[in-house]
Image (cartoon, rainbow, N blue to C red):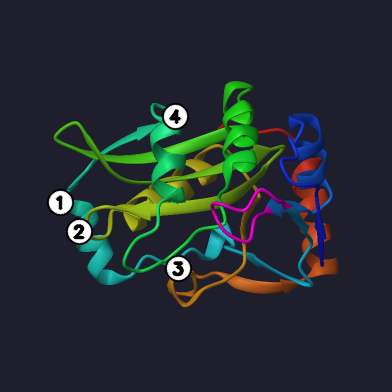
Amino acid sequence: MTRPLAPGFHIPPDLLLRAYATGVFPMAEHADDPEVFWVRPESRGVIPLDKFHVPHSLKKLMRRQPFDIRYDTDFAGVIAACAESGPDRRDTWINEPIREAYTELFRRGYCHTVEAWRDERLVGGLYGVALGRAFFGESMFSREPNASKVCLVHLVERLRRQNFLLLDTQFTTSHLKRFGAVDVPRRRYEQLLADALEGTAKF
């Protein structure tokens, strides 16, 4: 289900947090689109934290520690990279209102990044929103092979360590299914979300 907001609409941070708490999130048709839509899917993607699967080849790579992993050091760089088009994606759904809104959530401590660095260059990362004991993954990018995958592994490790209950991926892809992502019906998702919002966790 989608509901358009007016062109050039500014998303108030408090409204955005309330939306997440009710299972709704914003998207745009493409990066240059001034409109934003509220989305409430009938089926929601989640990665069960107790069933997260790391492919064997990625485990071998992780042991070599190919990247310097950092948290919350360059939000602007991460969201800008996630909004870029590339060979594997001609366009993205991250437009200017979305960038502004999540930047404000980052300033308020609700939005977080996991970043992969090599030789002081940002080569991969992801960002998402933490609310209660839920983490809502938004987007990821790689400028080097496997950089975003390594960030995802570190994200899950941190969420487990900090007693999070829910990792929301919004939708599932063949890429995410390799890590254990599953689709759950809206009603089931809303129960998982309600359970996760009852407590608090520090990212």
Q: Which of marks 1 and 3 is nearer the N terminus?
A: 1
Q: Do the residues labelled 1 and 3 touch (CB within 8 Å)?
A: no
Q: How far apart are marks 3 and 4 (CA)?
A: 23 Å
Disc ID at residue 45: none
Magenta run includes residue 28: yes
Q: What residue type is labelled 2?
A: Leu
Marks 4, 1: nearer the viewer: 4
Find the distance from the CA under tag 4 to the CA under tag 2: 23 Å
Q: Position of residue 96 (x, y in %)?
A: 58, 41
- Can you identify the residue that label 3 sits on? 179
* Residue found at the very far bottom of the displayed protein: 174
Q: Residue 193: percent from the left, percent from the top?
A: 77, 53
Q: Name the residue under label 4.
A: 72
Q: Earlier in the sequence, mark 3 or mark 4?
A: 4
Q: How far apart are marks 1 and 2 (CA)?
A: 5 Å
Determine which residue is flagged by label 1.
Answer: 64
* SS of the residue under disc 3: loop
Q: Residue at x 76, y 37 (%)?
A: 17
**Residue carrying label 2:** 61
- Quadrant location of the N terminus? bottom right
Locate residue 187: give its quadrant.
Answer: bottom right
Q: Do the residues labelled 3 and 4 touch (CB within 8 Å)?
A: no
Mark 2 Cα-neighbour bin, 10 Å: few <14, some 14–19, many ≥20: few
Mark 4 residue type: Asp
The magenta segment:
27-36
Q: In this view, does 65 lie to the left or right of 10?
A: left
In the rendered image of this protein, does residue 91 appear above or below residue 35? Answer: below
